[in-house]
């Protein structure tokens, strides 16, 4: 494994805001209040109007101002002149043999991202994206071979959740008895992109997801996965307060530098120091360490023993992820026996060590396999290794 760059060279193109009606989806309550006042809503009424519109959009899933029956007809017409309620457009949908759904959705500028829904016994998890492409160059990740195009807006992030609720037909009906069962019960920020390189938009979107007059998911049902952007970890505790997962994947800096090149900026010791402080933030739940099992690279007994030593004192669980292979991948999945032996060492040390069952592999929806359709043309092993900095 040759050295890979920490992040790809990124040319950021300034976004030209679309002219015409303004999208309300993704605005914070304060931003929506300001927008309504600018549109002509009397200042004294603005807070109440935000509450009413917010509930229609996020609790009932309504996209048409005409359906907002507790607002006057005149006011609804005024809103429709100035604002729209728009979410990403579904381009295609695939359903795996195991029930996993994967959508390709289009956002402003014609860019595409992927969203995955994983149904399980008693829960349903939505894996959402935070960037088009990814800044990072993790060498085992198919998504990481796609260059970063841009950050998603808060509206595009929460819009993925709204799109999935549409497809699952899961918006409650005003006045109907409350149904406590949720098909979409959990969100994981584990799709395309590094969420902590798009912190403000991710934070604002997740605050909408957690809002008690909106989608109403508890903090404990939202997990943000980072490769280790250390300066933003404390902010995540204080400003979002959700569960934290870390793409760990190695027990020495030498190996992690190659698998997760951001390690060259914030190494294992610096990352672990930030994680030790995290449970003292707003959230006292366990941190999830994600560990992809790569044959002959990071899966030895010595690695397992080093791992439990490193995380000593951190409330944690270790998620062991059998490597999801993709065309031209430079690694192989560890054998089942090797994964079980590794899991047993971690378990004997007192940590939960579930082995993740790969889901949606037949539709390339498993961890690390996401890429937008425009980027998925088969490339040679040599080209992919070069993109990942491994040639």
Image (cartoon, rainbow, N blue to C red):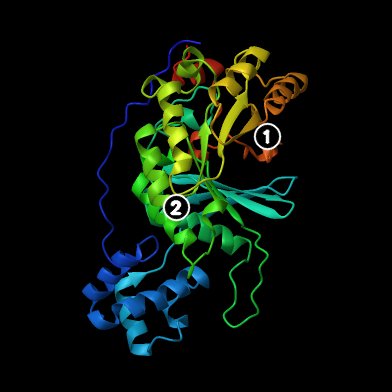
Q: Is residue 257 above or below residue 23?
A: above
How many labels sit on residues? Answer: 2
Q: Kindly tell me whether residue 235 is visible in this rendering.
A: yes
Expressed as whole percent of the image width and height from the top left, the position of residue 190 reads 53, 41
- Inspect this view and state whether residue 329 appears: no
Which dot marks residue 84?
none
Q: Residue 173: x and y, percent?
A: 59, 77
Give the left or right position of residue 347, taking residue 93 as reference: right
Residue at image point 61% right, 57% down: 185
Which mark, residue 352? Answer: 1
In percent of width and height, residue 14 lies at 24, 44
Q: Look at the numbered disc 2 and give the secondary structure of its residue.
A: helix
Q: Mark 2 against mark 1, which lies toward the viewer?
A: 1
Q: Badge 2 is on which residue? A: 157
Q: Which of these two is toward me, 92 or 344?
A: 344
Residue at 74 percent of width and 20 percent of height: 341
Q: Could you tell which of marks 2 and 1 lies nearer the N-terminus?
A: 2
Label 1: state its secondary structure: loop
Which sits in the foreground, 68 or 88?
A: 68
Residue under the point 74% across and 24% down? 344
Q: Counting other residues with Cα less than 10 Å from the Cα at mark 1, is it few (<14), some (14-19), or many (20 or more)?
A: some
Query: Looking at the image, which residue is at 55% across and 45% down?
Result: 285
């Amino acid at each position: 494994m040759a050295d890979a760059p920490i992040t790809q060279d990124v040319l950021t193109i300034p976004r030209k805001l679309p002219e015409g009606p303004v999208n309300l989806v993704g605005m914070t309550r304060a931003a929506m209040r300001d927008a309504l006042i600018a549109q002509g809503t009397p200042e004294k009424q603005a807070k109440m109007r935000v509450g009413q519109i917010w509930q229609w959009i996020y609790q009932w899933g309504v996209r048409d101002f005409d359906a907002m029956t507790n607002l006057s007809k005149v006011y609804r017409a005024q809103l429709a002149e100035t604002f729209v309620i728009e979410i990403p457009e579904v381009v295609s949908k695939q359903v795996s043999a195991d029930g996993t759904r994967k959508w390709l959705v289009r956002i402003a500028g014609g860019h595409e991202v992927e969203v995955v829904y994983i149904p399980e016994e008693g829960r349903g998890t939505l894996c959402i994206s935070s960037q088009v492409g990814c800044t990072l160059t993790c060498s085992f990740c198919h998504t990481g071979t796609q260059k970063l195009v841009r950050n998603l807006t808060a509206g595009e992030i929460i819009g993925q959740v709204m799109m999935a609720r549409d497809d699952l037909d899961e918006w409650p009906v005003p006045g109907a008895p409350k149904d406590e069962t949720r098909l979409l019960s959990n969100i994981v920020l584990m799709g395309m992109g590094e969420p902590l390189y798009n912190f403000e938009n991710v934070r604002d979107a997740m605050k909408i997801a957690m809002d008690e007059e909106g989608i109403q998911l508890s903090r404990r049902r939202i997990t943000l996965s980072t490769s280790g952007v250390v300066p933003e970890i404390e902010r995540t505790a204080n400003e979002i307060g959700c569960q934290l997962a870390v793409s760990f994947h190695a027990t020495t800096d030498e190996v992690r530098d190659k698998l997760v090149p951001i390690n060259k900026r914030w190494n294992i010791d610096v990352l672990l120091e930030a994680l030790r402080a995290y449970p003292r933030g707003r959230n006292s739940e366990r941190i999830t360490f994600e560990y992809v099992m790569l044959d002959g690279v990071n899966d030895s007994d010595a690695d397992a023993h080093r791992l439990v030593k490193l995380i000593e004192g951190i409330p944690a669980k270790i998620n062991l992820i059998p490597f999801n292979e993709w065309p031209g991948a430079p690694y192989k999945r560890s054998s089942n026996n090797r994964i079980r032996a590794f899991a047993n060492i971690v378990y004997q040390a007192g940590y939960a060590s579930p082995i993740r069952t790969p889901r949606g592999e037949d539709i390339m929806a498993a961890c690390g396999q996401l890429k937008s359709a425009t980027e998925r043309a088969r490339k040679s092993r040599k080209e992919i290794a070069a993109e990942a900095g491994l040639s």
